Amino acid sequence: MKSLTTRLTNKLNIEFPLIIAPMYMVSYKTMAIEAIKQGCIGSLASLNYKNTSDLENDIIELNKVKDRYNGTYAVNLLIVGNNNYKEHLDIVVKHKVPLIITSLGSPKEVVKRVHKYDGIVLADIVNQHFAKKAFKVNVDGVIAVGHGAGGHAGNNNLLTLIPILRKQYPEKIILSAGGIATGQAIAATIVLGSDGVSIGTPFINCKESPVSQEYKQAVINANIDDIVLSKALTGTPATVINCEELSLLEKKLSGKNISMQDGMKTLSSNDYKKIFMAGQSVGAINSIESVKNIIDEFKTKTINTLKNY
Ligand SMILES: Cc1cc2nc3c(=O)[nH]c(=O)nc-3n(C[C@H](O)[C@H](O)[C@H](O)COP(=O)(O)O)c2cc1C
């Protein structure tokens, strides 16, 4: 059996400690269902839902799917920069979503309401300062987002950050995210002291992903050196595959203040269908595979590596 036991798998009663990370305009219900079937954790990015009723319907469906398999799912709540945060929180509480991943902003209110029904809250953090703040308001764990991650990457190296957090919070759930693209890398994070991983970029161009063929091909074509940080898309530095259109957009926006909402509109607008967000692990992606195949390979390599360790 390809299972691995950690604090995360024990707490959620799942087989393997891997989250398909929430990704704006990438991670929807279909990918989440596949992750659940593989005994892992799928996720919905609540920012992807313009209508709260669509989010509610997907949650109702995922609640049914998770009861049939050894996996589960999370909903990502962006606390700052999400106009529908209050409604989204009401919906996840109403349907007792098993795992909430918070990003940008204090998870205090989420923890208070989600713990009432025994749900679990993990906060995205990029350094010790934000980990301390998150644990102060009683999150169950943190996802340490390191250098090289897709989206709003951190500055810190996971080789350094994970052992520091493990020592500081010996009983808490600590997950690793950023640039993890092989089972050997997953095993390495476990050896460092983490309880599992949250992986985004390697799933951007999976078979079930709804992104365009151009985006999928761009992920295959790009290598680690093509990933740059740009403020042009969300107002704060986010990782993007470098291209001519990005340089043009940066020139057009230079000197302007971009809010998260403006950026999200930019990303979904027709003008910029050639600017793609992705992390450094694009360099390790050479083909389009199903979620099942990607996870299967991750599991095999992780378990074999840990066996030989
Ligand atoms: C295209 C893309 C969109 C993302 N959108 C979100 C988002 O909406 N909310 C969020 O909390 N994180 C978002 N992230 C960050 C991921 O949740 C995760 O932290 C990251 O992908 C992990 O690094 P990796 O891509 O190197 O695996 C996004 C990442 C990518 C690549």
Image (spheres, grey):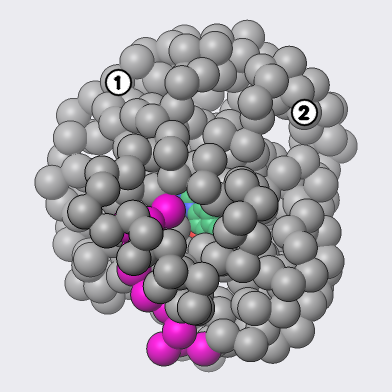
Residue matched to label 2: 58
304 in magenta: no
Q: Residues within 10 Å of mark 2 (few under 14, many from 20)?
A: some
- Residue 257 horizontal/vertical position (percent): 25, 44
Please indicate whether residue 103 sits to the left or right of residue 36 in the image. Answer: left
- The residue depicted at 76 percent of the width and 63 percent of the height is 212
Q: Is residue 296 left or right of residue 98?
A: right
Q: Is residue 231 magenta-colored? A: yes
Question: Which residue is found at the position 73% from the left and 16% from the top?
Answer: 53
Question: Residue 272, relative to residue 98: is it above or below?
Answer: below
Please give the residue where the numbered disc 1 appears in the rendered image: 108
The answer to whether residue 279 is seen in the rendering is no
Magenta residues?
A: 223-233
Between circles 1 and 2, the one closer to the viewer is 2
Residue 48's quadrant in the figure? top right
Q: What's the amino acid at mark 1?
A: Lys
Q: Is residue 280 left or right of residue 222?
A: left
Q: Which type of secondary structure does the marked residue at label 1 adopt?
A: helix
The image position of residue 216, as x and y in percent, is 72, 72
Q: Position of residue 297 (x, y in %)?
A: 72, 78
Q: Position of residue 6 (x, y in %)?
A: 49, 55
Is residue 136 among the parts visible in the rendering? yes
Tell me which label, 1 or 2, sits earlier in the chain.
Answer: 2
Disc sitting over residue 276 in the figure: none
Q: Point out the image quarter for the N terminus.
A: bottom right
Give above or below for 64 relative to 226. above
Kind of residue sitting beneath label 2: Asp
For the point 19% across and 43% down, the residue is: 130
